[in-house]
Image (spheres, rainbow, N blue to C red):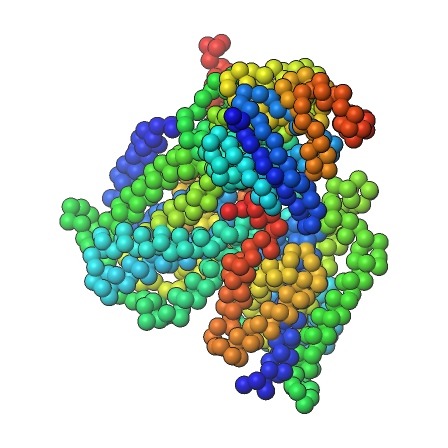
Amino acid sequence: MSLLSVRNISVSFGGIHALSDISFDVPEGVVWGLIGPNGAGKTTLVNILSGLIRPTAGSIAFDGHEDGPWSMSRAVEIGIARTFQQTRAFNGLTVRENLRVAAVAGAGHALDLGIARRLGLEDSLDRVAGELPYALLRRLGVALALSLKPRLILLDEPAVGLTADEIDRMGALIRSMTADGVTVLLIEHNVRFLMSIADRVSVLDRGRLLFEGTPAECQRNPQVIDVYLGRGGEDA
Amino acid sequence: MHGLTRPLLVSLVVLAAALAAVPLLNEYVLYVAMLAALFAILAVSFDVLLGFTGYLSLAHGALFGVGAYCCAYLTARAEVSFWLALPASALLTAVIGALVAVLAFRTRDLYFAVLTLGIGLVGHQLFLVASGITGGIGGFVGIPSMPEIALFGSPSQQKLVVALIGVWITYLAATAFVRSPLGVACQAVREDHVLAQALGIRIAVARLSAFVFGAFFAGAAGALFATFSNFVAPESFAVLAAGFQVVVLVVVGGMGTLWGPILGAVLLTALPESLRVASTYSLLAYGALLLAFIIFAPRGIAGFLIDGARRLRSARAGREPSA
Amino acid sequence: MLELLPQQLANGLALGSTYALVAMGLTLIFGVLLIPNFAHGELYMLGGFLTYAGVTAGLDFWLAAVLATVLVMGLGVLVDRITFKPLEQASGLSLMISALAMSIVLQQIATITWGTEPRTIPNPVPGILRTPFASLTYHKLLIIAVMVLGAVGLWAILNRTRLGLSIRAVSQNRDAALLMGIEMWKVRAATFAIGAAFGALAGALLGAAFPIYPTMGVIPVLKALVVLVLGGIGSIPGAILGGLLLGVAEVLIAGYISSELQDIGAFVILVAMLLVRPQGLFGRAQIER
């Protein structure tokens, strides 16, 4: 029985099909990778799963809830959290206040500073988010999503712009999430990073699902190599 | 959440000091202080929306008017006791505020300001037109005074005491509100409403409650204003009068703190009155002050005080280890 | 009733032309620089008052109107320097508060200079043009003509000059425009000067038929913002069409429903528009609600 089940999702913006007929099933406890060239529709898919935009057609089921697609607050309520490609945090508030907003106003439980510790933010609690260095800001974005205590977390390119050390750290963090029972849907541009931590991979190209399988199978698939890896893949 | 004990104790001390000063004041100062207190209630209630939720409403003056006319009508025509009319006016204003909010929150940013400006103008127009209830341009005459409180002082002293207690209640209620999950949600809406939604915050509920909170206390301030002055006229509630004035009080005092607007109301009401500046120049001064503060000191007087206190504390902390 | 329709349409177009004039300036500044210039209504007011001052000083109306427009153009640039330039990095909320403050300051300066008593300028073009369908005063025809000329002139500046190209580039993508070496201060100054010119012209022309007083800019700027809702932010054709639409709608409301409703007609249209099509306003409606 899968945790997340996406059925025939399509969406178009002004006549252009951003996603057509996407279906896949994510079992509980895995890191599911999603790759594809720019404009393939990866972020659109995350936006749909998190309720930010509504698909034109299709259905989503999650953890026994069959009523998807849903609104953003409903998505959080049933246990789906997300991060943003361009990290969003409450820039005028301190790190502590940011985490409190997510915990108290978002998820409705008390502030848990354990998350800050886990993400190495414990020394920056009283710094204003807008003044954080880039790497810390990205971790704050992940911390906000984790504060919701989700069952599924959608990470939209968490490694972008990070140094090699920071990427390793992010990878370890993502693996530790699954150990805690959080399922991860990971969008990445950095193919090597993704292949190193994903259990299974889907490849999107121009709004269509091109391939689904293990990272090893993915790297051998001629179609994938042709449309994606062949174009110079991980240079971004 | 953080305990409310500290703000409760501090505000009690300030209230006690203010109350202790009441017997020392002459009639004129009592009057000015009473006005300042009413504007403080208005400013604190407005800051919950402007400073904590990030929405500029220009309809707050009209809501102040709704409370005033409601109390005037209830006490003068329906002969309801003032102590009943006061909460009734606040409640009615909150209900009307909710209707306004449902409409206005279909928009945000510039359009929110424009829509509330329109609502403020229409509200003022209605006060003029509905002369059967409001007395029209001639104003509402003969509003009964607050019943005397037998225990102490002259009527003017009693008015000020009631107004000061009103400020205290408003301040405490606002403090409790902004620290509640709803209030925290409001601050999330102010900072980034998309992220707020992504974190599961129901932003519609949050900002609606901020608006209704503001309307309730604006209505209460209006009711006090009506009964204290025995007369109200539409000019007091125009967008360019109370509607604009609260923006100035909050920005100059310090947006996003709850004591800043009180400070702003006291300083900006007391100063022109004590200097006896002509009203034309006082509106010009208000405009110039607002411009200067939003450009050079957007955190208001409260910002200066907070920074000053922090510097003092760090200077002291720097000295202590050697001592 | 129906035989009055051509006349009412003509009146509505004349009224709508004044809204379009005010709205074009406002939408240009908002569209290019994302600045909500509430003080635009005060530039309109000062266009009226400065023309009045020129006429009282013995100048010919046309000369006074041109001088007033030039002065207000300079003032528009000054308003930007004082009110908005220092807040380049600040939030939209700060810009709105700042604009509101400047608007009050200009109103009060006018009050101190000229008092609150309404002033009038003798109509420079008396008389009425009569046609079989409708009659229009020459004054209303003048307003329609100036609106059309202004629109053509603005189109020519934006599409046929280097400056216009820079302005359009900034409105499309400010960062890219800066990278291409466009000098932002020139674009800002030009945008504010042109925008102010439209406000001032409207004020000067309207002042020749209606009273001039310090708060006369509040309602036109509110209506111009309604026009922006109708026509789409930053769109010049939208401002013209929206302005004309609003003018005609108001005259029809006054003619066929109730003249008392004319003044709040614009507001009712705004509310109705927001209720029916809130997504028409900022395009990303799915994020709101």
Q: Nearer the viewer, residue B173 or B205?
A: B205
Q: How many marks?
A: 0
The x, y position of residue B66, in whole percent, is 36, 59
**Left or right of B145 on screen, residue A23:** right
**Quadrant of the snapshot with the N terminus of chain C:** bottom right
Front residue of this view, candidates C94 and A180 = A180
Against B138, residue A235 (above or below) is: above
Can residue A141 be seen here? The reply is no
Taking depth in this image into account, of B321 and A8 the one nearest to the observer is: A8
Q: What residue sits 27% from the left and 54% below the top?
A: B88
The image position of residue B58, as x and y in percent, is 48, 54
Say which residue appears at 70% left-offset and 36% top-offset: A208
- Outermost left residue: B150
Q: Position of residue B257 (x, y in %)?
A: 44, 37
- Please give left or right for residue A210 compared with residue A176 in the image: right
Q: Residue at the location (58% across, 41% down)?
A: A58
What residue is at 48 percent from the left and 10 percent from the top?
B321
User: As drawn, which residue projects farthest toward the top?
Assistant: B322
- Give how far across and how far down residue B85 sits, in percent: 25, 55
Residue A204 appears in the rendering:
yes
Question: Would you say A163 lies left or right of B173 here?
Answer: right
The answer to which image quadrant residue A210 occupies is top right
Q: Is residue A140 left or right of residue C127?
A: left
Which one is nearer the viewer's eye here, B199 or C130?
Answer: B199
Tell me which corner region of the image, top left, top right, bottom left or bottom right, holds residue C207: bottom right
Vertical order, B201 against A175 (above or below)? below
